[in-house]
Image (cartoon, rainbow, N blue to C red):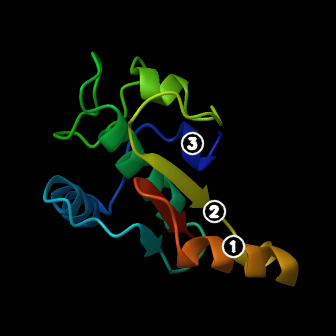
């Protein structure tokens, strides 16, 4: 069984949090820096992947299934989730998992980037 968050097509729990983030995005009020906190293994990274997939797949042929809280593996965004280049005007997302494992220099560099991020870039930090 592979429990890696990027491979979790179904979102278990966190439905109200997911819906709240999507409402914020639709109203153009989604913060560009979101810190998800809680015990390890409760699904914070999986929640972030689902939010990201929903937003990126809105106009795609196989968009996110909001009724069942499921990522459609046929959507283009799911297939390109590990792509590191920006090729369109869609929002860009940075997901940092296990931030506590970063060394002091990495944390300082991240803080500098977070102070003044570019437009249309969203950070999810776990």
User: Residue 64 at what x, y percent from top left?
Assistant: 28, 33
In this picture, residue 57 sits left or right of residue 92: left
Q: Is residue 11 visible?
A: no
Depth check, front residue: 117 or 39: 117
Q: Nearer the viewer, mark 1 or mark 2?
A: 1
Image position of 124 with respect to 111: above or below: above
Q: Is residue 62 above or below residue 99?
A: above
Residue 10 sits in which quadrant? top left
Q: Is residue 34 left or right of residue 58?
A: right
6 lies left or right of 48: right
- The residues tagged by marks 1 and 2 sit, at their Cα atoms, a distance apart of 10 Å
Q: State the SS at label 3.
A: helix
Residue position for label 1? 110
Residue at image position (32%, 37%) is 70
Residue wearing tag 3:
6
Q: Earlier in the sequence, mark 2 or mark 3?
A: 3
Mark 1 vs mark 3: in front: 1
Q: Are marks 1 and 2 in contact (CB under 8 Å)?
A: yes
Disc marking residue 96:
2
Q: Using residue 44 as the reference point, say whether residue 3 is left or right of it.
A: right
Helix or strand or loop: what does disc 1 sit on?
helix
Q: CA distance from mark 2 to mark 3?
A: 13 Å
Crowd class of label 2 (few under 14; some 14 to 19; many from 20; radius 10 Å): few
What x and y, as percent, mark residue 72?
Answer: 36, 26
- State the residue at coordinates (65%, 36%): 84
- Specify the quadrant that holds the N terminus: top right
Q: Position of residue 118 (x, y in %)?
A: 49, 59
Q: Secondary structure at mark 2?
A: strand
């Amino acid at each position: 069984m592979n429990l890696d968050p990027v491979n979790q097509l179904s979102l278990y729990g966190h439905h109200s949090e997911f819906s709240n983030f999507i409402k914020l995005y639709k109203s153009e009020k989604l913060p560009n820096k979101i810190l998800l906190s809680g015990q390890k293994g409760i699904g914070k990274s999986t929640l972030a992947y689902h939010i990201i997939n929903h937003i990126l797949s809105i106009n795609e042929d196989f968009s996110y299934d909001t009724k069942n809280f499921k990522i459609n593996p046929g959507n283009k965004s799911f297939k390109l989730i590990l792509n590191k280049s920006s090729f369109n005007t869609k929002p860009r997302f940075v997901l940092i998992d296990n931030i506590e494992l970063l060394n002091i220099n990495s944390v300082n560099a991240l803080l500098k980037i977070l102070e003044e991020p570019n437009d249309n870039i969203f950070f999810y930090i776990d």
